[in-house]
Image (cartoon, helix red, strand yellow):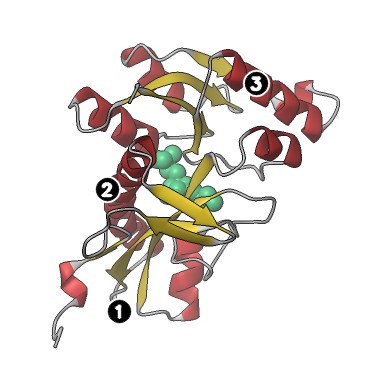
Amino acid sequence: MSMLKIGVLASGRGSNFQSIIDEIESQHLDAEIVLLITDNPSAFAIERAKKHGVHYLIMRPKEFHSKDEFFIKTAEELKERHVELVVLAGFMRIVRKPLIDAFPNRIMNIHPALLPAFPGLHGQRQALEYGAKISGCTVHFVDEGMDTGPIIIQAAVPIFQDDTEETLSERILKYEHKIYPEAIRLFSEERIEVKGRMVSIKGDTFSEAFIVNPAIKKNPE
Ligand code: GAR
């Protein structure tokens, strides 16, 4: 199997982008990030791209006539570099049809909650304010809705009584950095099968599709 070509879209800090770079550099993931596109000229993700020799583009949506045009151009740039999988890593925009149609079931997103709970912005804050006891993160394929596409992998983490948005976000982020590269690895091994909104993983023995923080299993039996 040839090396998977990945395009990353990020708007900010880029720690998920970094976790993918790290997995590739440590040879746990047979892939190559051929392009980073950011909509934010001050995104820290750009520094990470520079440090690791990833080609990057800054594309500001307001410089386009419409949102659709922005996504048409984005798709063109990705296609030009023969991208096979588009990875949204803290990309804070709703992806529109022209990009989704160009990469059907080939765009992944990570969300900091257990979907379908708490979609949209501030998934961690929403879970806290709702009084949930367990939250986590979800890797899913992107469709035209807001965090509604087929779910690939989830990880659960506990919410403690004294948690703040910061402490919970930090706990969830550690698992984001585990499950995102894992989902990409499964994709690169051609083990992900999508039927409607059902995702199955070929050759999955117990389950590679979920990770439960051991702290949750106080009394597992
Ligand atoms: C991550 O927590 C990611 O799950 C979240 O933004 C953060 C980006 O961090 N994404 C969303 O909320 C998308 N709806 P990063 O830039 O350090 O990867």
Mark 2 residue type: Lys
Residue 184 coordinates in the image, percent (x, y) = 37, 40
Q: Under 8 Å from ligand 1: the CB of mark 2? A: no
Q: What element carries label 1?
A: loop
**Residue 186 vs residue 23, the one in the foreground:** 186
Disc 2 packing (10 Å; few <14; some 14–19; many ≥20): some
Q: Quadrant of residue 164?
A: bottom left
Residue 141 coordinates in the image, percent (x, y) = 53, 49
- Give the residue at mark 3: 59
Of callouts 1 and 3, which one flags the residue occurring earlier in the amino acid sequence?
A: 3
Is the residue under label 3 in contact with that under label 2 (CB below 8 Å)?
Answer: no
Q: Nearer the viewer, mark 1 or mark 3?
A: 3
Residue 191 coordinates in the image, percent (x, y) = 36, 46
Numbered tag placed on residue 161 in the rendering: 1
How far separated are the C-alphas under marks 1 and 3?
41 Å
Q: Quadrant of residue 196?
A: bottom right
Q: Which residue is drawn at 26% across and 63% down?
A: 207
**Residue 94 vs residue 108, the one in the foreground:** 108
